[in-house]
Amino acid sequence: MKKIDVLVIGAGAAGLMCAIEAGKRGRSVVIVDHSAKPAEKIRISGGGRCNFTNLHASPENFISQNKRFCVSALKRYTQFDFIDLVNRHDIAWHEKTLGQLFCDESSFQIIDMLLDECDAANVELRLNTEISNIIRRDDAGFDVTTRTGAQWTCQSLVVACGGLSIPKIGATGFGYQIARQFGIDIVPTRAALVPLTFDPDMRADLGQLSGISVDAIVQCHKKQFREGLLFTHRGLSGPSILQISSYWDEGDAITVNLNPEEDAFDLLKSAKAESPKQAVHNVLSRILPNRLAQMITARHGLDRPIGETGDKALRLLATDVNQWSVMPQGSEGYRTAEVTLGGVDTNALSSKTMECRDVPGLYFIGEVVDVTGHLGGFNFQWAWSSGWSAGQVV
Ligand code: FDA
């Protein structure tokens, strides 16, 4: 049984940040991961360039049963603190859109930076390591055993196992299992930042639009996002759809404005007056991609020239452009989701330190906690902020 100060489970964004901070304070830290490589999600993030934070990160960008929970950590370790760290490591970056910051070169630079910081802080990293048993000691701290029989006694145990999305690269529900072991509630989890799917009929109908993208406003439960929307073979994707998926539940319709810049009815009315011989889809294709314009017009059965098409029919058509009501059948699920909504109930945790109120020495950080960011670098910022906050006290 080796005695250490801190054992961190999960060498992802949050776990590495916490380990670095604890190591810098002189604590003896071991970080374990069951995967063969650390930080696999950082590697695949942002299309390989890691959208590592967002200039505009603030509590409004996060979803949680307790909206205020994230405030303290986000204030104590901000996006600008992380940008300083990136700058200190001479990693070139750029703002892509909406405050989203990406590496110019590769997400490996962020991983290397974190691993270098771990080295400098004397953090011991153990990969291919699965935990088989955790026991809380009577005096204080925890006894932790691995499947291969290694044992540690630690004062602080930090759970940074992430969420359920992308099991293929190592996501498990282990963090939730540990929470349950210690009587901590879990806010029900579901896939978020995920493409939405159509039922088979809609798929047969709209699947042919696959590959078309538009700038759209997508709305559900009074929440709306204006970003790109992409038609896929199975349904809808693109940033606006990923964003709204975090607010969408099975059985909900979403409303899509396929061209926020134009009122389709105004356009159709004036085209009818000015050039009545034009085909309706030709008029629509002035504001929508041609294939999409043809499909929407065909669905309304409007194959006469616009001058012979009644205003009522044009209004219905325009509604499908500016207020298209879609009922997704489901989502692509954890297989492709970027994050997991829900998780460890924040009521059980201190918002300043991430320590469990009823289990001193036990901490939960990062995505395993019921704090989920919007798309755009916010989830990593939560991982950095919550990891840093725990790292000051473990
Ligand atoms: P994370 O998942 O990073 O780390 C958890 C670690 O725990 C993993 O290394 C895992 O192997 C390990 N683990 C799991 N079970 C274990 C067990 N039983 N025993 C030991 N170890 C275990 N966010 C963002 O802000 N910007 C972006 O660009 C992107 N892009 C992106 C792309 C894709 C494809 C995905 C899937 C996700 C994103 N995200 C993102 C989200 C972001 O990756 C995510 O929110 C953070 O990685 C969460 O950090 P954590 O450290 O909490 O978990």
Image: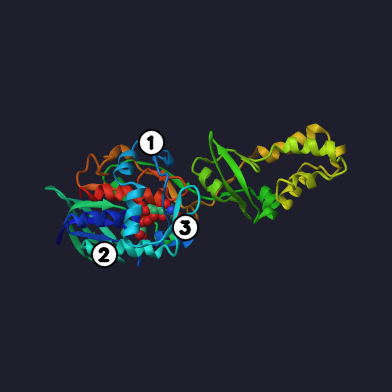
Q: Please tell me the numbered disc located at residue 339.
A: none
Q: Colour scheme used in the picture?
A: rainbow
Q: CA distance from mark 1 to mark 3?
A: 26 Å
Q: Amino acid at mark 1?
A: Lys
The x, y position of residue 81, in whole percent, is 32, 50
Label 2 with label 3: CB-CB less than 8 Å? no
Side (left or right) of 21 relative to 367: left
Q: CA distance from mark 1 to mark 2?
A: 34 Å
Is the residue marked 2 within 8 Å of ligand 1, measured from its CB? no
| Residue occupying the point 79% across, 47% down | 282
Is the residue marked 3 within 8 Å of ligand 1, measured from its CB? yes
Q: Tag 3's secondary structure?
A: helix
| Residue 161 visible to the viewer | no
Q: Tag 2's secondary structure?
A: strand
Q: Tag 1's secondary structure?
A: loop
Q: Amino acid at mark 2?
A: Leu
Q: CA distance from mark 2 to mark 3?
A: 25 Å
The x, y position of residue 99, in whole percent, is 46, 48
| Residue 16 visible to the viewer | yes
Q: Which residue is mark 2?
A: 125
Q: Which residue is mark 1?
A: 67
Q: Nearer the viewer, residue 95 or 358?
A: 95
Circle 2 packing at 10 Å, graded few (<14), some (14-19), many (20+), is: some
Circle 1 packing at 10 Å, graded few (<14), some (14-19), many (20+), is: some
| Residue occupying the point 54% across, 52% down | 332
Q: Which residue is mark 3?
A: 46
| Residue occupying the point 26% across, 60% down | 31
Q: Amino acid at mark 3?
A: Gly
Question: Which numbered disc, 1 or 2, marks the residue that appears first in the sequence?
Answer: 1
Q: Nearer the viewer, mark 2 or mark 3?
A: 3
